[in-house]
Image (tube, helix red, strand yellow):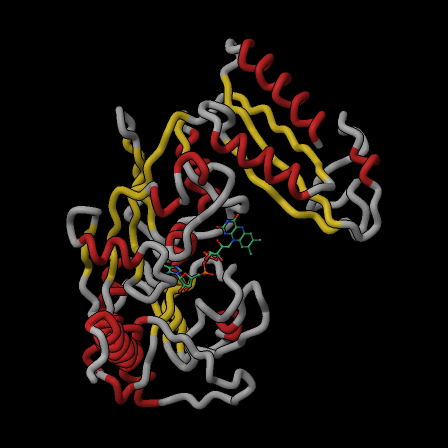
């Protein structure tokens, strides 16, 4: 007796799925030749230097340059667990330096075994921005075209993939503008966070940073320089955003801006019960026009809450942080902010009211 149609359909689907997965995994090395992921490589292996690869790279005419020596720093990241020494570091001065290098490596083909990884500020953790015996592209040395700010109804900034967010903040503030979505820490590059997501307390309102990009310029795995948006070369656009550096090198991004807040009221509320903390957080996130920034943190109170740089509470705080002396206990903190202009005094009354309500529940 044959299997029922739904069972055989399921079986066919399963075979098809397995087949697609095999195809996908087989095609990964070629697709991801742009960036290495070297999970099987032993970091303690002493690297060899392929002289033919070096001499081949030295023939390239560049605005910037390659370093072949003293490049140990490119084998480090914030996690400090993976150390893959590259063959060379490219310090590009122009987008064509990146494009010409990748074109050259693509033409050399697989015998060269060269992989490429873009390196932003190297604040990722698992060797993501490293390339074992490959080429690391030091994105922070990419110079120009200069950051350009467009004011108007839909303001935006065109910034390099190697620009730090802190510099974008300083430049856009000169025009009274600022990006809508941030990370907490701003010494990270545009390309680095857009390859992940870029999440902070504004994400509940505007989405992560990758939701606030109008346009990208990308150097593909073949070395082509391609402009992409959600309508033009959309597949590349959505692959590169959040693509962990595997689908192309972001050389330029058009980032949406909004008027920068003139003043901000910053409030932190501590909880020792998770359910109260998460109820308040959900309530604030779902209520319309509540706050402009909402972020929750978990604090393991090992060293004392006061004067701890992570919690940044100090004895002068009006709230009773000392009430939470709780050696080793897990605490929860809601960090919220309201943007306002000095003339909006009623907003401050609303904030005080909300603060009192939250403190009563915590
Ligand atoms: C102290 C600290 C605070 C942090 N805070 C936050 C936070 O609040 N919110 C948050 O979301 N994340 C946060 N992160 C994580 C951080 O956003 C990511 O690790 C981010 O990738 C780091 O950016 P980077 O410039 O250092 O990138 P790198 O670590 O250099 O690179 C990360 C990845 O992006 C790729 N890449 C880099 N540049 C490009 C480019 N131009 N084109 C294509 N691919 C590229 C790399 O190849 C690599 O795969 C934090 C990390 C640290 C260490």
In the image, residue 111 above or below residue 326: below
Q: Residue furthest front?
A: 1
Q: Residue at x 30, y 89 (%)?
A: 52
Q: Residue furthest left?
A: 232
Near-viewer residue (357 or 124): 357
**Is 50 situated left or right of 40 in this image?**
left
Q: Which quadrant holds residue 92?
A: bottom left
**Is 304 situated left or right of 118 in this image?**
right
**Is 296 situated left or right of 163 in this image?**
right
Residue 76 visible somewhere in the drawing: yes
Q: Residue at x 51, y 9 (%)?
A: 343
**Is 51 situated left or right of 307 in this image?**
left
Q: Residue at x 50, y 62 (%)?
A: 124
In the image, residue 202 above or below residue 264: below
Of the 4 image quadrants, the one containing the N terminus is: bottom left
Number of marks in the image? 0
Q: Residue at x 36, y 56 (%)?
A: 242
Percent position (x, y) of residue 152?
26, 25
Residue 24 visible somewhere in the drawing: no
In the image, residue 210 above or below residue 115: above
Percent position (x, y) of residue 330?
73, 49
Of the 4 image quadrants, the one containing the C terminus is: top right
Near-viewer residue (24 or 221): 24
Percent position (x, y) of residue 321?
78, 34
In the image, residue 67 above or below residue 293: below
Near-viewer residue (80 or 207): 207
Percent position (x, y) of residue 149?
31, 34
């Amino acid at each position: 007796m044959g299997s029922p149609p739904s069972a055989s359909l399921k079986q066919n689907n399963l075979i098809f799925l397995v087949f697609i997965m095999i195809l996908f995994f087989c095609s990964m090395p070629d697709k991801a030749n742009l960036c290495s992921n070297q999970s099987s490589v032993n970091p303690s292996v002493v690297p060899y230097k392929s002289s033919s690869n070096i001499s081949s790279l030295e023939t390239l005419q560049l605005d910037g340059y390659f370093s072949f020596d003293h490049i140990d720093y490119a084998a480090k990241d914030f996690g400090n667990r993976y150390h893959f020494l590259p063959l060379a570091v490219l310090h590009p001065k122009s987008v064509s330096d990146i494009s010409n290098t990748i074109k050259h490596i693509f033409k050399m083909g697989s015998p060269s075994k060269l992989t490429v990884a873009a390196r932003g500020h190297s604040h990722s953790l698992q060797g993501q921005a490293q390339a074992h015996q490959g080429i690391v592209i030091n994105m922070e040395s990419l110079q120009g075209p200069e950051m350009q700010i467009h004011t108007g109804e839909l303001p935006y900034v065109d910034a390099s993939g190697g620009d730090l967010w802190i510099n974008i903040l300083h430049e856009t503030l000169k025009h009274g503008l600022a990006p809508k979505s941030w990370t907490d820490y701003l010494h990270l590059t545009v390309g680095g966070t857009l390859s992940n997501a870029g999440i902070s307390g504004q994400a509940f309102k505007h989405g992560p940073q990758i939701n606030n990009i109008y346009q990208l310029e990308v150097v593909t795995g073949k070395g082509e320089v391609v402009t992409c948006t959600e309508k033009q070369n959309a597949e590349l656009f959505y692959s590169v955003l959040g693509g962990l550096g595997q689908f192309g090198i972001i050389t330029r991004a058009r980032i949406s801006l909004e008027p920068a807040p003139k003043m901000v009221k910053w409030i932190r509320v501590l909880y020792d019960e998770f359910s109260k903390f998460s109820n308040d957080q959900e309530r604030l996130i779902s209520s319309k026009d509540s706050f402009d920034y909402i972020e929750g943190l978990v604090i393991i109170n090992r060293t004392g809450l006061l004067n701890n740089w992570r919690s940044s509470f100090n004895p002068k705080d009006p709230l009773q942080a000392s009430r939470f002396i709780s050696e080793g206990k897990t605490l929860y903190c809601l960090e919220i902010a309201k943007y306002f202009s000095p003339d909006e005094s009623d907003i401050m009354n609303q904030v005080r009211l909300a603060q009192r309500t939250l403190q009563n529940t915590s």
